[in-house]
Each structure stands twice: as structure tokens, then as C-alpha cells.
Amino acid sequence: MLRTILLIVTVLFIAIAGGTWSAGYVLTAFDGFSKLQIGQWEAFPNAGTESADPYALANTGRRGDVALGQAEGLVFYLRGDDEGKPLSSQCRYRFKGSVPEARFFTLYTTDKNRETVKTTRRFPSELYSHDIIRDENARITILISSTVEPGNWLAVEDMQEYRLILTLYDTPIATATGLAKPVMPAVERIKEGYCG
């Protein structure tokens, strides 16, 4: 009798602990289906629509995000540089190239859990398309680092890893027919010192 009770308690413990762990994992590490990937950049075009899957809805609700509908815009996430290495505040990066067609865009950083990170100093922790200096071909170069940089600069706080969030407002990417594949900006690690 005691053995049966212990067996039932063990099975219940494994089921409850396993279920809790798997639900937590799905809500923190899995963003849902219908991912759009361009290079290292990821977006979830269905996140703000009626066709969003339950995982995307749960993630959006847990983080308190206001998901954009397909006609409103698209949010791209970047976890690593062009070589796939995680973004680190100990390194400097060069964001360069053209941003896909959009009425305007924003660029900022978050921590690994996508919590917005504001700098404690009066440095630019987010950039807006109308604040950026472009070259003669309308290309953009932004230096991303924790130290002051000349020109377009996005400041990051000292933390091990972070994410870049590029939000394109009023962009046709989500509804494009697929005839022309959009190109996202490159994010190159500047190879120097520890980051060589």
C-alpha cells in the first residue's frame, strides 16, 4: 500500500514538475511558428493577427508586448552578429546597409529576455530613422558599443548578451509576394582585442 502511494506521488511530482518546466521553457525560449528569417534577423509576421498560433499569443501576453498587425509593421529580432556569435556589450559592432522599405523605423536593444534596456547615462539607447545620417546611396552605418562613437551611434549598457530590435512601420515585407527577397542590414563585429 505504501509503495503504491509513493509511486503515485512520484509520478504526480514528475508530471507537475515536467509540465511546469516545459510550459516555462515554451514561454521563454519559443516564439511560435511562422517565423520569417532573413539572414540572422527573425520576425513573426502573424504575431499581431488572428492567425497567430497559441505560442506566439502566450509569449506576447507574457511580455506585455503590443503586437503590430501586418498592415502596421513588423518587428525584427537579432540575437547574433553576421557570424552567428551572440551580441555582447564587450564588443563593438557596425550595423550597415539599407533598411527594407518602411515609412519609418526604430532600432534599440533589449536584454536576453527582451526587456528594454535604457542607458543610465544620457546616451542614445534608441535610434529613429529621421535621426540617422545616411550616405549618398541612402545606406546607413551605425556603430553599436558601450563607448562613445562618432557619427551614428547606438549606446549599449554593460551586460553579457543583448538583442537588437529593428521595428519597421508601414512596411510591405509581411505582405510581399516573394518576387523580391528583402535584404536586411549586416551587423559586423569589429575585430579588435577580446573581440578579434
Image (cartoon, helix red, strand yellow):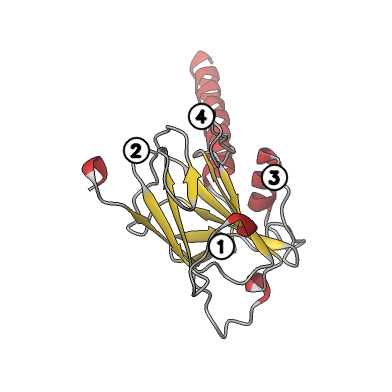
Q: Is residue 176 left or right of residue 190?
A: right
3D distance between C-alphas at marks 1 and 3: 17 Å
Mark 2 belongs to which amino acid? Gln
For residue 168, say whether it is visible: no
Q: Nearer the viewer, residue 153 or 93?
A: 153
Which amino acid does the dot numbered 1 rest on? Lys
Q: Quadrant of residue 44?
A: bottom right
Tell me the element at label 4: helix
Residue hosting label 4:
14
Q: Is residue 50 above or below residue 109?
A: below
Q: CA distance from mark 2 to mark 4?
A: 41 Å
Label 1, on which residue? Answer: 35
- Tell me the SS state at disc 1: loop
Residue sticking out furthest to the bottom: 179
Element under label 2? Answer: loop
> CB of mark 3 within 8 Å of CB of mark 4?
no
Residue at the (47%, 34%) spot, across then down: 157
